[in-house]
Image: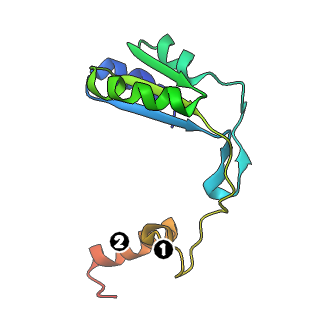
Amino acid sequence: MTLGTLATVVGAGASNLVLIVVDNRSYEITGSQAVPAAGLSDYAAMAEAVGFPRVFCFDDPREYAEAVPDILTTPGPTLVHVRVEPGSEGPIGRSAEEPARYLRTSLAEWSRVLRDALEGDPE
């Protein structure tokens, strides 16, 4: 995500958008690298600064669960920053055992497949 996207959302007047930022302070899916300024960035404050009319921040799962009906039924745009603990899931895989099909193939390989399809190569 780029921070400019937050301003774009507000500028577009997207009243039916709820953006949920699940913040575990790491890029867990690619090997748990630390997010730059992890723990220092205040995504809720950033959303407020660009004009999001509804902003929530949660550390407690019970408070989040109680707020969900309001979050989902009141016009936004709405940003929800949910702070969670990092998990233990390893990085994504490209093997046949990877359950998410789209993750089994690299972007480079998908690009070759698309190029071949556009060129009429039946592979």
Check disc 1 and report the residue beneath it.
109
Mark 2: few, some, or many residues within 10 Å (few <14, many ≥20)?
Answer: few
Which of the 4 image quadrants contains residue 23?
A: top right
Viewer can see residue 52: no
User: Against 100, is 84 above or below?
Assistant: above
Q: Disc 1 or 2, which lies upstream in sequence?
A: 1
The residue closer to the viewer here, 121 or 61, is 61
Tell me the SS state at disc 1. helix
User: Against 97, is 26 above or below?
Assistant: above
Residues at discs 1 and 2 in contact (Cβ within 8 Å):
no
Across and down, in percent, residue 81 comes to 53, 28
The residue closer to the viewer here, 53 or 112, is 53
The residue located at (43%, 72%) in the rendering is: 101
Check disc 2 and report the residue beneath it.
114
The residue located at (41%, 12%) in the rendering is: 51
Viewer can see residue 71: yes
Q: Is residue 25 left or right of residue 5?
A: right
Residue at mark 1 to residue at mark 2: CA–CA distance: 9 Å
